[in-house]
Amino acid sequence: MIAGYILTGGKNRRMNGKKKLFLEYEGKPFYQHIVQAFHSFSTIYLSVDCVEPYEMVGLPMIVDTYPNLGPIGGIYSGLKVCKEDALFVTACDMPLINETAVREVIEQYQNRKTLTIIGTNHQIHPLFGIYPKTILPIIEEMIREKNYRVMNLLDFTEVSVVQLKNNSRIAENINTVNEYNRLRGE
């Protein structure tokens, strides 16, 4: 069984402190776009550093076991706590994801049962994909060694990459005010 898992992000410094999860695009906060793409999952968790700012979202939350480690810490905490066999991880600043891309990743994962992520425009995107619990020991070792880069995880485990069409904007991260303004056509 797979659950959806939204990484809520860190300090949001490049967004002037605004929580990216709540930024609006096409009349809805980013998280609602992600929840819509994840609608086939019976559970969707939020990965959070603290509960308070996110209570109004109404999704179950998993608090970081080790704060300030970035995405690897959130993924570790989610895999450690969730009851499902795997988590479909996405960053909260990816409002362009859609159900079709989610389904493609799930289909490939079901065939391979390995870490399954997407690739677009000759790049891989580790923050949009399925992380099975079987990789938890690898992540634990990385944390012990203070190796916190998610991209480094790909060197230590089998990875399956779903190539999306070259012009796909699915994996576009909205990290800065300028990127957010561009997304909104400003």
Image (spheres, helix red, strand yellow):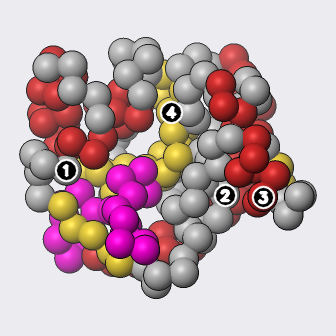
Residue ID at (66%, 31%): 14
- Quarter of the image containing the C terminus? bottom right
Residue 132, label in figure: none
Disc nearest the viewer among 1 and 4: 1
Q: Which is more toward the observer, 130 or 127?
A: 127
Q: Which residue is mark 1?
A: 154
Residue 162 place in picture, x, y as percent: 33, 74
Residue 158 in view in this figure: yes
Q: Which mark is residue 182?
A: 3
Q: Which residues are magenta?
A: 109-128
In the figure, residue 81 lies in which quadrant?
Answer: top left
| Mark 2 or 4: the one toward you | 2
The x, y position of residue 130, in whole percent, is: 34, 57
Which numbered disc flags the more N-terminal residue, 3 or 1?
1
Q: Of label 4 and label 3, which has the lower sequence position?
A: 4
SS of the residue under disc 1: loop
Q: Earlier in the sequence, mark 1 or mark 4?
A: 4
**Total tally of numbered discs in the picture:** 4
Indicate yes or no whether the magenta region holds residue 119. Answer: yes
